[in-house]
Image (cartoon, helix red, strand yellow):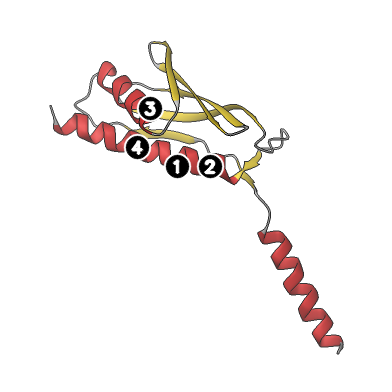
Amino acid sequence: MKMLKIIISALTLLWVAGCSTSQPVMNMTNSLVPANLSEKDVSRAIINAGVSKKWVMREEQPGIITGHIQVRQHQANISIPYNTVNYSINYVSSVNLDDKGKGKIHRNYNRWIAGLNEAIQIELNRASSNK
């Protein structure tokens, strides 16, 4: 009977831990850009990728694009510094994504960033193959 209580307690603890929606904030750092692209090509690829994933993208200045996404009551803001060698996707702020300033955020944010990064890579490769 005592062993059964221990097993049930352990399973309950694992279940509760698995229900957590918070994960460490995922930033993409120095993702590589194909060698034959201009800065304008990179900018266009990033913006097209963002739009394809429902992000609102804006070129703030040469070399920096900002992105905003809203899904129901959830919002995220990112900054994407880029050049002809690499780009990064950096977390800026969010609303209703469980960011409590401790480097953790709702897992959906990380899914959105992974999907955006994949779309950027596809657009960069497409632009590179068209040169």
Residue in the image at 22% along x and 24% along y: 37
Determine crowd level at label 2: few under 14, some 14-19, many 20+ residues with C-alpha closer than 10 A.
Answer: some
The percent position of residue 42, horizontal first and vertical second, equals 29, 23
Q: Is residue 11 above or below residue 22?
A: below
Q: CA distance from mark 2 to mark 3?
A: 17 Å
| Earlier sequence position, callout 1 versus callout 3 | 3
Tell me which amino acid carries mark 4. Answer: Ala
Residue plotted at (50% across, 44% down):
111
Determine whether the residue tagged by mark 3 lies in a helix, strand or loop. helix
Q: Position of residue 126 (x, y in %)?
A: 21, 34
Q: Which residue is mark 4?
A: 119
Task: Specify the label residue 114 is tagged with.
Answer: 1
- Give the SS element for disc 2: helix
User: Pointers 1 and 2 in contact (CB under 8 A)?
Assistant: yes
Q: CA distance from mark 1 to mark 3?
A: 15 Å
Q: Secondary structure at mark 1?
A: helix
Q: Position of residue 14 (x, y in %)?
A: 70, 67
> Measured along the vertical axis of the image, is residue 120 above or below residue 38?
below
**Which amino acid type is marked by label 3?**
Val
- The CA distance from mark 4 to mark 3 is 10 Å
Marks 1 and 4, how far apart in space? 9 Å
Q: Position of residue 97 (x, y in %)?
A: 65, 37
First-in-chain label (2 vs 3):
3
Q: Earlier in the sequence, mark 1 or mark 4?
A: 1
Question: Residue most toward the left?
Answer: 131
Q: Which residue is mark 2?
A: 110
Classify the position of the N terminus by image quarter. Answer: bottom right
Which residue in the protein does label 3 denote? 51
3D distance between C-alphas at marks 1 and 2: 6 Å
The answer to whether 88 is drawn above or below residue 16 in the figure is above
Amino acid bearing label 2: Asn
At x 80%, y 74%, the residue is 9
